[in-house]
Amino acid sequence: MTIVGQRQSVLPNANGNGKQTAVHINERFTGQFRRALTLPEDADPDAVEARYRDGVVQITVQRRASAQPRRIAIQ
């Protein structure tokens, strides 16, 4: 599985009077990024969900039904 994205700069190009904005330290990178992840053997590739909220990507991977532990009811 590969995650690809791009982060835009939040700094203004001009401050209203046509001059460039001076930045001394910027601790966040901008531009494109790519992350490659290996899914476990028992993962179901059709049951992968991704959510983006508050700057965080949450990825949920379900196991195949055959890999789930068997449940036995005790009476």
Image: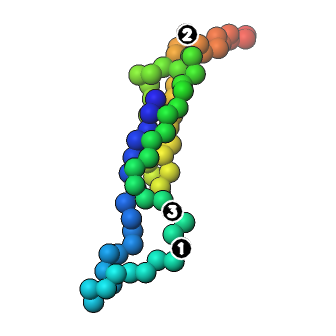
Closer to the camera in the image, 40 or 22: 22
Which residue in the structure is indicated by mark 3?
28
Q: What is the crowding at mark 2: few (fewer than 14 residues within 10 Å), some, or many (at least 20)?
A: few
Residue located at (53% from left, 73% from top)? 25
Horizontal and vertical percent position of residue 53: 45, 52
Of circles 2 and 1, which is in front? 1
* Residue 73 in sight in this render: yes
Of circles 3 and 2, which is in front? 3
Residue located at (64% from left, 14% from top)? 69
Which residue in the structure is indicated by mark 1?
25
Q: Amino acid at mark 2?
A: Ser
Horizontal and vertical percent position of residue 17: 27, 89
Q: Which colouring convention does the figure follow?
A: rainbow
Position above or below: 48 against 13: above
Residue located at (34% from left, 81% from top)? 20
Position above or below: 67 against 40: above
Mark 3 secondary-structure assignment: loop
Horizontal and vertical percent position of residue 43: 53, 20
Disc number for residue 38: none
Q: What is the crowding at mark 3: few (fewer than 14 residues within 10 Å), some, or many (at least 20)?
A: few
Disc number for residue 66: 2
Q: Amino acid at mark 3?
A: Arg
